[in-house]
Amino acid sequence: MRTFVAVEVASQDAIKSMLDFQKTLLNSGLRAKPVGANQLHFTLMFLGEINETMLDSIKSKLADLKFDPIQVTYTGIGAFPSLKFARVIWVGVDPDSAPRLINLAKEVESRLNTLGFRSDKQFTPHITLFRVKERIKNIASIMDFKDKVFGTDILNKIKVKKSVLTPNGPVYSDLFVVGSE
């Protein structure tokens, strides 16, 4: 099964704000695939294909993970790898919560290293809003929203999620949840 470790957006107000923003960009002519409300999350670590035995080992490594709830403000817009060749359009986070999310991702990776998992890139806290399939001309105009605030949230759960790829996009389900104190 294809899996990853994530922290989901929990605030319904923030989710609504992100979905409204997606509609605004789509109505302005953006040609990209929006991410659904149930797919808004931070990917702390992509695990790839695993079996049930490995899932049990992952659960064991993460079961006692403790962290303080993270107060986050979803703010700003960006693109990976760049605005001139956007493949992903995302929402960022405030400068106070970013290091806490980075440290949480590092802790997850540290715990899963002994099972052979390694991140292929440095974690950058972001929530994917769009996946871009066709090349879009420079989308620097989205930077008009670089200071837009999408809401606040308290993040207190890490999930190991299963991802099933379908023609209509991925379908996610929870395999394991660990919460903060």
Image (cartoon, grey):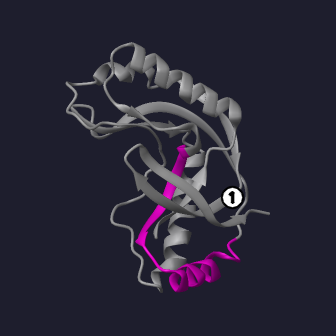
**Placement of 30 over or under 118, stated as above or below:** above
Q: Name the spot of residue 156 as percent of width and height, x first.
A: 71, 55
Please tell me how many numbered marks the rendered image carries: 1
From the viewer's perspective, tell me whether residue 23 is left or right of residue 33.
right
Residue drawn at x 22%, y 28% as measured from the top left:
136
From the viewer's perspective, tell me whether residue 40 is left or right of residue 133.
right
Residue 144, image quadrant = top left
Q: Name the spot of residue 176 as percent of width and height, x first.
A: 65, 68
Whether 94 is among the magenta residues is no
**Placement of 176 over or under 69, stated as above or below:** below
Q: Name the spot of residue 100 as percent of width and height, x first.
A: 59, 55
In this orientation, does residue 147 appear?
Answer: no
Residue 83, image quadrant = top left
Residue drawn at x 57%, y 35% as measured from the top left:
74
From the viewer's perspective, tell me whether residue 91 is left or right of residue 74.
left
Label 1: how many Cα within 10 Å (few below 14, some 14–19, many 20+): some
Residue nearer the viewer, 40 or 33: 33
Q: Which residues are magenta?
A: 39-65
Quarter of the picture holding the C terminus: bottom right
From the viewer's perspective, tell me whether residue 124 is left or right of residue 135.
right
The residue singled out by tag 1 in the image is 157
Q: Amino acid at mark 1?
A: Lys
Residue drawn at x 64%, y 32% as measured from the top left:
14
**Placement of 33 over or under 113, stated as above or below:** above
Q: Name the spot of residue 152 as percent of width and height, x first.
A: 67, 35
In this orientation, does residue 121 appear?
Answer: yes
